[in-house]
């Protein structure tokens, strides 16, 4: 395996920094990248199905899927054909002009959801930032000071200024204060929310039906329904962030279908365009009616290339047989994971739905992720003690079982 060199220790300028780099002093390509990620060693060079292969030819079973992006796995024929067809057409035209593929994608999302309008953007954080703006725009038609956004304990909604303020991770927030104002975090408790939701000042509540980064916490459907009832009663918009748990990952196209509560706004991203950067904001007619030309925009959102690939992904992940496969295998996987916890005695809790699972370990999750990596299984963390499993949605039961076998060995 190719090992990227660790960046050199603290940078101490010396005279040699003033001369042109020689062959010996030229930094490796990896050194030129900002050090904001703690990456695993080596380089992946190819992928097929649910496997990635590194530069030394070692194969890894992938239970990360590019963090819930690669729903169709690697080397998928249909996705490849959709990308080739998209590349033969228009790539970008700007939102000054209509994109047929974007219109088709929006129509499909509307047809399959509660929404009546869709806005396209480029990432999850951008989708949530847009959702905050749309919620505030709507709220301002109800009252001049109605503007606050409330997120829940354990939430992760992104790393931009607005979304970071709605993300409950002190280590992500503290170095960047002051964050955007008018955004707060409240406990996952209906009584606390009842106190916080002042109808005069609060515009929206945002929640992930399954908190991903916050430890794969499936919110109690009863609680979600209570939040829906409370937000309706207080005239507060409800935003569901389904960036990680949406588009088939839980075994239904949208996670909210399993919670018995329908939001006013829903955000999507990760798997939407098969690995290309794309986000979407779905909303009711009532919210959409308050948005006027010029209120919001983005250069690339919903462009023809991205949207035509996303149309292919939508067709695939909304197929009822595909969703059945995720729901059935996901339920089986959860049972196996619980059995594994009983057998090994090394797991403190198991949580999840569909192809989105987390388990709490005795030591640190990073330790397990690193051992799994050595053993050829890709996993990731969700907080300090939770190992998160996000297999590609195309993974078969046998492939899921293989991953469980590796986990059992290392636990
Ligand atoms: C639930 C949720 N919301 C928002 C985001 C942010 O998405 P992005 O990284 O595309 O900005 C993520 C990313 O992990 C997420 O899981």
Image: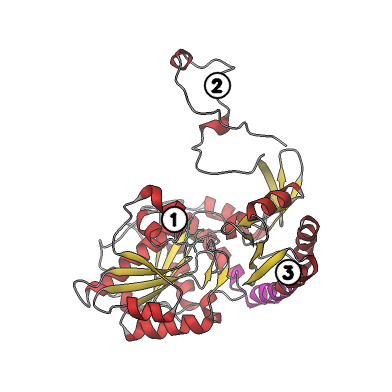
Residue ID for mark 1: 170
The residue range painted magenta reads: 317-332
* Residue 69 seen: no
Decide whether residue 220 is among the magenta residues: no
Rendered-image quadrant of the N terminus: top right
Residue ID for mark 3: 337
Up/down of 302 relative to 7, above or below: below
Task: Determine the residue positioned at 31% across, 52% down.
Answer: 178
Percent of width and height locating residue 80: 63, 54
Circle 3 crowding by C-alpha within 10 Å: few under 14, some 14–19, many from 20: many
Which element is circle 2 on? loop
Q: Nearer the viewer, residue 170 or 85?
A: 170
Q: Quadrant of residue 210?
A: bottom right
Task: Determine the residue positioned at 22% across, 75% down.
Answer: 141
Any atom of ligand 1 within 8 Å of the CB at mark 3? no
Which element is circle 3 on? helix
């Amino acid at each position: 395996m190719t090992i990227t060199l660790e960046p050199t220790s603290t940078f101490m300028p010396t005279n040699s920094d003033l001369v042109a780099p020689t062959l010996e002093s030229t930094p490796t390509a990896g050194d030129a990248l900002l050090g904001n990620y703690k990456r695993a060693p080596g380089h992946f060079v190819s992928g097929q199905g649910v496997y990635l292969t590194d530069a030394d030819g070692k194969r890894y079973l992938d239970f990360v899927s590019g963090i819930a992006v690669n729903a169709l796995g690697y080397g998928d024929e249909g996705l490849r054909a959709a990308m080739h067809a998209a590349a033969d057409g228009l790539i970008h035209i700007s939102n000054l002009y209509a994109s047929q593929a974007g219109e088709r994608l929006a129509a499909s999302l509307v047809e399959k959801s509660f929404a009546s309008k869709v806005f396209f953007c480029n990432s999850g954080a951008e989708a949530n930032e847009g959702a905050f703006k749309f919620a505030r725009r709507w709220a301002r038609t109800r009252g001049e000071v109605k503007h606050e956004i409330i997120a829940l304990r354990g939430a992760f909604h992104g790393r931009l200024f607005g979304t970071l303020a709605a993300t409950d991770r002190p280590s992500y927030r503290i170095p960047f204060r002051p964050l955007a104002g008018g955004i707060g975090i409240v406990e996952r408790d209906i009584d606390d929310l009842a106190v916080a939701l002042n109808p005069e000042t609060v515009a929206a509540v945002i929640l992930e039906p399954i908190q991903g980064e916050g430890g794969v916490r499936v919110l109690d459907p009863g609680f979600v329904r209570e939040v829906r009832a409370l937000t309706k009663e207080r005239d507060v918009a409800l935003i569901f962030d389904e960036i990680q748990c949406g588009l088939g990952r839980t075994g239904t196209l949208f996670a909210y279908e399993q919670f018995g509560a329908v939001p006013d706004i829903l955000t999507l991203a990760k798997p939407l365009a098969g690995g290309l950067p794309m986000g979407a904001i779905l909303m009711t007619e009532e919210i959409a009616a308050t948005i006027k030309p010029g209120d919001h925009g983005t250069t690339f959102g919903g462009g023809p290339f991205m949207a035509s690939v996303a149309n292919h992904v939508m067709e695939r992940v909304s197929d009822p047989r595909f969703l059945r496969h995720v729901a059935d295998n996901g339920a089986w996987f959860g049972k196996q994971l619980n059995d594994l916890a009983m057998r090994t005695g090394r797991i403190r809790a198991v949580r999840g739905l569909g192809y989105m699972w987390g388990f709490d370990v005795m030591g640190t999750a990073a330790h397990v992720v690193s051992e799994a990596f050595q053993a050829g299984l890709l996993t990731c963390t969700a907080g300090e003690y939770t190992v998160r499993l996000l297999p590609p949605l195309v993974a078969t039961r046998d492939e899921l079982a293989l991953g469980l076998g590796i986990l059992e060995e290392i636990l």
